[in-house]
Image (cartoon, rainbow, N blue to C red):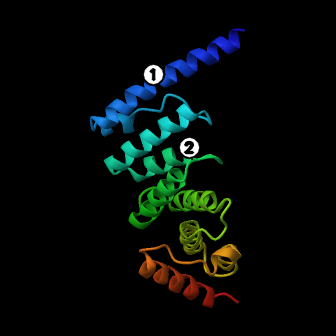
Amino acid sequence: MRPLLALLLLAGCATQRLAADKDLLARGETARLAAEAPPCAGPAPECRQAQEIRAEACRRQGDLPCAVAAWSAALAPDSPRRIPLNLAAAAQDAISTGAGDPARNAEAELAAAEALRRGRPADPEGCAHAASARLALALLAAPGPARCTILATLPAECRHAAPVPGREAQSRRLAAALAAQHRSCP
């Protein structure tokens, strides 16, 4: 009985804190939200929503590593599409700007890509992020067999996936960069 009571009290506390965090975000108090730890962690919906709020606050503050970490914590197999999309975008921005650990950011982008591709293996956005993450990981590896192994793991469904609508030029640049790296492989 006591463990159940403790669990109910924790859930109630998290729900109250979640409401307060939503209010802070609505008022634009992103610095405070980004600095605070979320009220809970784990797969519970209120915990994932708290991570989403923190991720948005971190993003608005320009703290991409914090946003990547919070979006990663919010990601679950049944996440709504916005979560992996936001995680992938934050991770890609962090890689592009050199914010945080590039390997950790690329792994986060790859996790988001896999979530986007779940159920739809040739999803254009999932494939674009899978390719982007693989390219980043490959470029972090020393030239040679390790780099080629990373590049070879791009899912077959993504090799000829449609470009993301509205981002055709970016898709062509990514495909050209991947092709250039593949040419250096035996």
Residue 94 location in percent, x, y?
43, 60
Counting other residues with Cα less than 10 Å from the Cα at mark 1, is it few (<14), some (14-19), or many (20 or more)?
few
Mark 1, residue position = 16
In the rendered structure, find residue 77 and report the number of the disc placed on it.
none
Q: Quadrant of the N terminus?
A: top right
Q: Quadrant of residue 56?
A: top left
The percent coordinates of residue 151 (x first, y second) are: 65, 77
Query: Residue at coordinates 57% horizontally, 19% vertically from top-left?
Result: 10
Q: Secondary structure at mark 2?
A: helix
Residue drawn at x 68%, y 60% is: 119
Q: Are marks 2 and 1 in contact (CB under 8 Å)?
A: no
Q: Is residue 12 above or below residue 65?
A: above
Give the residue type that dot 1 points to.
Answer: Gln
Image position, residue 23 (x, y; %): 34, 30
Q: To which residue does mark 2 refer? A: 73
Mark 2 and mark 1: Cα distance apart in space:
20 Å
Crowding at label 2, few (<14), some or many (≥20) Cα neighbours within 10 Å? many
Which x, y percent locates residue 152? 69, 78
Q: Residue at x 43, y 75 (%)?
A: 167
**Looking at the image, how many numbered discs can be counted on the residues?**
2
**Camera-side mark, 2 or 1:** 1
Looking at the rendered structure, the secondary structure element under dot 1 is: helix
Q: Relative to residue 76, is residue 174 drawn left or right?
A: left
Which circle's residue, 2 or 1, is located before the other in the chain?
A: 1
- Nearer the observer, 37 or 89: 89
| Circle 2: residue type | Ala
Residue shown at the point (68%, 75%) measured from the top left: 157
Q: Is residue 54 above or below residue 12?
A: below
* The C terminus sits in image quarter: bottom right
Nearer to me, 173 or 49: 49
Q: For residue 89, what is the image quadrant?
A: bottom left
Give the side of residue 54 with respect to residue 14, left or right: left
